[in-house]
Image (spheres, coloured by chain):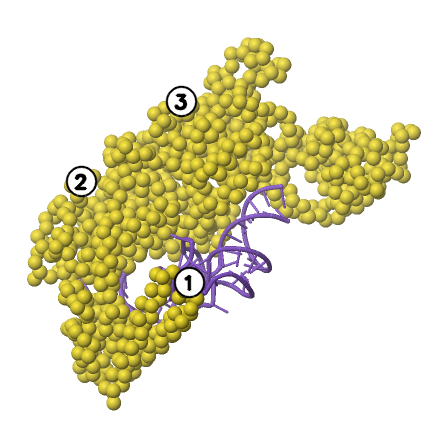
Chain colours: A yellow, B purple
Amino acid sequence: MVPRPVRPLDERGVLFSGVEATAMTDLPKAYTPRDVEGRIYERWLAADVFAPDGAGSTADPDLPPFTIIQPPPNVTGSLHLGHAQRTAVEDLMVRHARMRGHPALFLPGLDHASIAAQFVLDGILAREGASRQSLGREVYLERMREFVDATRTVILGQQRRVGASADWERLRFTMDDESARAVRVAFERLYQDGLAYRTEALVNWCPGCRTSVSELEVVPTPETGSLWSVRYHLIDEATGLPDPGATVTVATTRPETILGDTAVAVHPDDDRYRSLVGRRVRIPFVKRDVPVIADDVVEREFGTGAVKITPAHDPDDHATGRRHGLAAPTILADDATVAGTGTAYDGLDRYVARRRIVADLAELGDLAGEQPHEMVIGRCQRSNDIIEPRLKTQWFVRTEPLAARALDATRSRRVRILPERFEKTWEHWLTTIRDWNVSRQLWWGHRIPAWYCPDGHVTVTADEAGPRACDVCERPADQLVQDADIFDTWFSSGLWPFSTLGWPEETPDYRRFYPTSVMETGYDIIFFWVARMVMLGIHLTGEEPFHTVYLSGLIRDPDGQKMSKTKGNVVDPLGVMDEAGADALRFALIHGATPGQDQRFGPVKLENARHFANKLWNATRFVAGARPSTIAADAERRLPDAAKLGPAEQWLRSRAAATVEAVDAAMANHAFGEVTRLLYDAIWSEYCDWGVELTKIRLADESLDPDEREATWWTLVEVLDTYLRLLHPVMPFVTEALWAAIPHRATDPELLIVARWPGVGERVEAIESAVESFLELIRGIRNARSEARLEPATWLAAEVVVPTTLGPEFEVLRPAIERLARARPLERRLTREALTVGEGTLAIIAGDLEAVVQPPVGSADPAAAELDRARMERDLAEAEAWLIQARERLANEAFVSKAPPAVVAGARDREAELVDQVERLRDRLAHQRSTER
RNA sequence: GGGCGAUUAGCUCAGUUGGUUAGAGCGCACGGUUCACAUCCGUGAGGUCACUGGUUCGAGUCCAGUAUCGCCCA
């Protein structure tokens, strides 16, 4: 079958049509994602910024490319939250690399999902009263193509809503022409290299799906079954007839397979049966006489110690049969009905036959017993049918040599798996790997490019037209028949990192972007997919297909339940985005993302993320609106004048530098959750809560030198710009929209998506600690006010002792401190003794600073004074406790001699600080008591 | 049977080489019409870091074992 080629979509952004455009600078009071996201995505598409070689790309061609090939979602339906998280994480990495100037390729794709797609379509057909068989192969495949076209549109639309900055021009499908060719060439290569072979073997057969499946697709399921004891009659060698009185009792969980028995086995050292070895027994119903054999595999403790051997229907029996040269008659058809036994059971379902056989044995008097039995049976991952081991001629890939090289790739660290602990799982699976059954008796997939001549010779070719003649006997093509089977869907997936880039051709993309950078996927398909990509990639291309494997965890519901359609707890990402926006969804999902770790996801996390987007929106709205009138609305971005910066401005810049540094470190560690936490705190708790608040009063102060106000505004703009850049990979839409509302540098591009990632600025520790002291003071005053239950709105007179080292900063920040502490006038004192202490005075000990606050005249409330004293006594008790602890530590000889000097010095500083604090608190309390007297 | 993970505030989770007042969001309590944001602001309460033992000057963090829950492999 020649798959229909899949072209990139041309109906771009179709999901967003009808959305009213809003002027960028006109920011509404609340952030409404729906008004913004569609327009932004359209702009990105129009600017052609997703492709590394797009017209709008600002990539530095000298930097190494960064490539993520998207794990192609199955075209079986719509995407769920897990997909949204994966896309968000992949997109985050790609956007980050793109902003750092790397040519960044995010190559999207779709998977035909052979068995999964057939399972879904078969379900749809069943509801229509039709079936795969009733339609026939051609009609069925036509139907499948219609189905796939529909789901494809839904899936691609969902990914755009999430904000995937994928290069849609390079969209690929595992069933397109290029993939089909890659599959044929790969298989031909494996065949020629002796790594693909065809043989009759016992395979896992799913009677529902009517195909073999690999052992990975068999789910071991514990169940309570029965263990039946059945008497087989020994053959009297003199007469050649069964002896009615001499029997051997075998134990079996599958009496219907009696029809395929070719031996009875006992343990060679089992004295109970020693004399029987070599004799023959008669198998009931089929009247076959089979030997009693001795074999080590028999467990003497199991059942009666004698077991029946059915080589065609049990893996252990198959091995035993081979060792003893036993025949292996097949007794089941593809649909798991009994067939070809020549008994009355032919045509019956395997379980109907089981009941009949048990009943018939009982009637014959040969059923010796039945008891409940705990066992593990294999079920089909897809259809849940009970898997039937069956002898079939199938194609296999020899995995041992491939696995050895895959192991070498991880052991040598050429491929790193995150989190690292999965390397153990990887090691275990690859060292115990079995050959891979790659043929499937399905229709939707890549046909195996193998042809057979009437003599059974095999010809494998990658030629799309098929072979010209039999490789062995040279019979012409018209006498050859192509294998009816298709490949396991994971075979084409295993080629994905390079088939998408043009392999087997040496295309420019292949040369440029292969090997790829990071493979992000779920840990549940590490064997199905990751291992096969590494094995096939190394063999076929000579290189590891990627250097990092990032394994995501599962998204669970708020109760920790796995999301599934049957439980009805599946969340549609589109609904979530309608409600909260794509950015909030992305932020929430990334916030909880730790590699290899599942996360619970619910509305609470989403709310928080939505609020954060709104906070950012309003912060930008404030900054944009606070532009001093001396700066033109369309002014080009200027750096603030360093000489005009106040402490708050320097603090903001230093904190931004700290944040860039921390975010860089977290990104390098793939700690994306940490990135969101860092930015949340920096933006909300630092920039908004303190930075904006401290600078507000300066911005509004008409009495100031315009240069100073401008420097303040440019600082707010600069730091906000930095945060928007840092946050862009996580929340691309809102950051892009807001970035448009603030001035840019002359060197900046039009769009944030292709703007440069910020460099680390200069940290100024002295300013950070100075400003932190004043923040402590503000917190202290607020706290004292609240504890003393004073009216929040009233202005309180205050005095503060400010050491000369902090004097200049204090003078500049005084109006801001007054405003934030609601303390005015705020007088500076040079010594503690100079503080005015009267009735009801509140005392504040805040780090280096000490202050007093006077309650409003006439409102001196004895109760308030009492509350304040209680607060200070609490603080004192606490400080004293810490001091005792600190002193005990320093008194410890071992600590002082063995701990690193820096730690000891730190402890001494801490002690001194506590001594000072305790002293000041005691002093203050004593003072207060004296004034009350 | 083998392996892995989780166990930290009422709930959901951070806590990267061991360094000393263990953090956040939500929830809770009290208070707020301060001109970006009530999708907000301020203040506060709340934790013997599952348990037992060990290593260490020092353990949420390292080691051994136990318990509960979950996953993978056979």
Answer few, some or many: residues within 10 Å of disc 2's Cα (few below 14, many 20 plus, some between 14 and 19): few
Answer few, some or many: residues within 10 Å of disc 1's Cα (few below 14, many 20 plus, some between 14 and 19): few
Chain of residue at mark 1 = A
Kind of residue indicated by mark 1: Lys
Chain of residue at mark 2 = A
Disc 2 or 1, which lies upstream in sequence? Answer: 2
Residue appearing at x 30%, y 70% in the figure: A913
Kind of residue indicated by mark 2: Thr
Local SS, label 2: loop
Local SS, label 1: helix
Q: Which mark is residue A747?
A: 2
Which residue is nearer to you in this view: A624 or A32?
Answer: A624
Residue appearing at x 24%, y 35% in the figure: A58
Q: Is residue A797 above or below residue A595?
A: below
Can residue A423 be seen in this snapshot?
Answer: yes
Point out residue B67 in the picture as x, y percentages from the top left corner: 59, 60
Identify the residue position indicated by label 1 in the image. Answer: A898
Disc 1 or 3, which lies upstream in sequence? Answer: 3
Query: Marks 2 and 1, Cα distance to the nearest angstrom?
Result: 54 Å
Q: Nearer the viewer, mark 1 or mark 3?
A: 1
Identify the residue position indicated by label 3 in the image. Answer: A505
Disc 3 or 2, which lies upstream in sequence? Answer: 3
Local SS, label 3: loop
Point out residue A919 in the picture as x, y percentages from the top left corner: 29, 77
Chain of residue at mark 3 = A
* Left or right: residue A191 compared with residue A376: left
Q: Is residue A830 above or below residue A450?
A: below
